[in-house]
Image (spheres, rainbow, N blue to C red):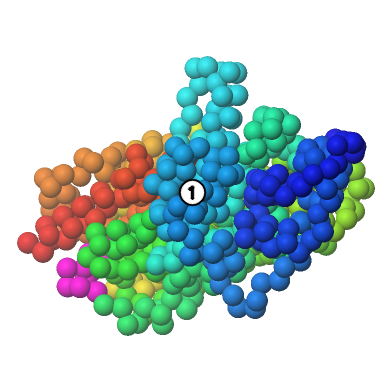
Amino acid sequence: MSMECCSLCVGDPEDVLKHYMCNMGYEYSKILLAIESCEIENCSGLPDCVCFQKSVCHLVDFIDSLVEPEGKNPASSSTPQHLNNDTKKNMLSDMGYTADEISHAVQICGDSCDIDILVDFMHAKSAYKEEMQVLNSRTPEAEIDDEEAASISQHISKAGKITMSYNNQMRQSSSESDGELDTWIGSTSSSSSWKSGKLKRKRIINGISSVDEDECTESNNSSQNISGMHGLRGGSMLQNRVISSAMRGPPYCYFENVALMPKNEWETITRFFNGLKPEFVDSAEFSACHRQRGYVHNLPIEGREVIYPRSPMTIQEAFPGKAKFRPYWDTRTKMNCINTVRSPSTVCKEIADTMSKYDNEPPLHVQKRILCLLKKFNLLWVNPGLVAPLEPVEMEILLGFDEEHTRGASSMTERYKALGNTFQVDTVAYHMTALRSLYHHGIKVLSLFSGIGGAEVALHRAGIPLKVVVAVEGNSRRNEVLESWWKRTGQTGRLVHISDVATLTHDVLFALVQEVNGFDLVIGGSPCNNLTGSNRVTRVGLEGEHSRLFFEFPRIYNLVKQLQAQ
């Protein structure tokens, strides 16, 4: 879009600049500092005016030049935490948000959360509604579930990620593109988005950080940024843990879910496990991808071993054939968290067009923008100047499965969902090796939410024979994937399928315990739909429609433990 001087360049544009910069995603405190420190030209405040855009550039350059003190917690760089609720609400109102929007955001995110998080939530919800209107106008009968809604929200929102760790809320900035890459916003036009005042564009200060998970989007140093996050060091860090008599195995329990949950939900989970606290692990220590998860378990700590041969530890090791296409400035060594949806094709097209524009030698500022998108959407270079999303077979490699493990799934979409919801095998296998000396003759497993068999594959990789596995999974296609792996790997134990955790009543569990003569391990991870940071619409916590299934895990485990104690 070409810009001209509007011939009305008089007056003070300060208020308009504040609103404009807030919608770009910059922190309010830094905007104020930039306006005080920079010389702002008189201007009408019209966004299309070149004078106004010059002022914006000056402010952006000033904020980007700010250097965080070494060792400073990223959370401390956001809007000051001493702002009271009334001040935050007034600031949000000045940005154009309604009282209902603000009230709903505070209710979901919490009274004490940072103002930037509130802005992110409201923007994502607004953007999702706009996208839904477009989709509904095309296919009125189409129904979109929570995962697809989260994908749409992630696609169109230029918002940072809400990250909340156990006993520690943290804010991570995410870098978004502008300039040549502004047009990838999705099916809503960029012009209408600017007019709505809700299109956010964020830039990274001091380099580009990865965007997760989980969003799982995690930074390359994410294991240092989450309270209690560790991996190979976990054994020594858990030596002093206290396990109540009610939680001592056998039977052992092993529960997994996303590390970054809203509203201190890990504290709720800990209470339901009788005070058993989670062990937070980033799978980047075991593989070529980040996957930050919390594991609540009462397994022994001594005897853990890394599984050999090790899975590829870098992108280059995982995909050596594609290394020749990677530009020198793509410095990634790890992929971000595997998601349940395929990244939008529009992103790949815009990157390809931009690379072509610069003959595959983009300037530094464009390199940074492209690198941000590569990290956010887990894209691989497949040809010079061309990127593509991860294919299921590539996701299987990163997650520690054999290639084509999910080939029996019904569709590509189903394979993406199944892989996005499973365990990272190498990480779980590392934990399971502590049981190898106890169950070298075989283990009897109650596998809840078993999916494509991540727990079973991990136990097999850990060298523990599978004597009995009762796999509880409602998706028949995923059951077929597990069944296929069971036969392919020559398992000699017994595999039983049950379709729904809700059917595991006292009488059913009593019969199962009698039939198999007791379980040694109850393992699984409940749905994270309402917990993951990539869901910016229905991220309501453990009471959400899908994630409330968590409560089935401690119910079933406690029943099994009581029945076997009798």
| Residue in the picture at 32% in, 75% down | 300
Q: Which residues are magenta?
A: 243-254
How far across and down, in percent of the image, does residue 376 sit?
64, 51
Residue 92 highlighted magenta (yes or no) = no
Q: Is residue 413 left or right of residue 194?
A: left
Q: Is residue 390 left or right of residue 331?
A: left
- Quadrant of the image occupied by residue 16: top right
Above or below, 304 against 39 in this view is below
Residue 161 or residue 24, whichever sits in front: 24
Tag 1, which secondary structure?
helix
Residue 423 seen = no
Residue 484 or residue 195, whichever sits in front: 195
> Can you identify the residue that label 1 sits on?
89
How far across and down, in percent of the image, does residue 87 sit?
49, 54
- Quadrant of the image occupied by residue 139: top right
Q: Is residue 518 left or right of residue 355?
A: left
| Residue in the picture at 25% in, 49% down | 552
**Total marks drawn?**
1
Residue 365 seen = yes
Q: Farthest residue in the front direction?
A: 11
Above or below, 486 against 427 in this view is above
| Residue in the picture at 71% in, 55% down | 203
| Residue in the picture at 46% in, 32% down | 145
Amino acid beneath label 1 = Lys
If the image is split into quadrants, where does the C terminus sit? Answer: bottom left
How far across and down, in percent of the image, does residue 98 sit?
50, 37
If the image is split into quadrants, where does the N terminus sit? Answer: top right
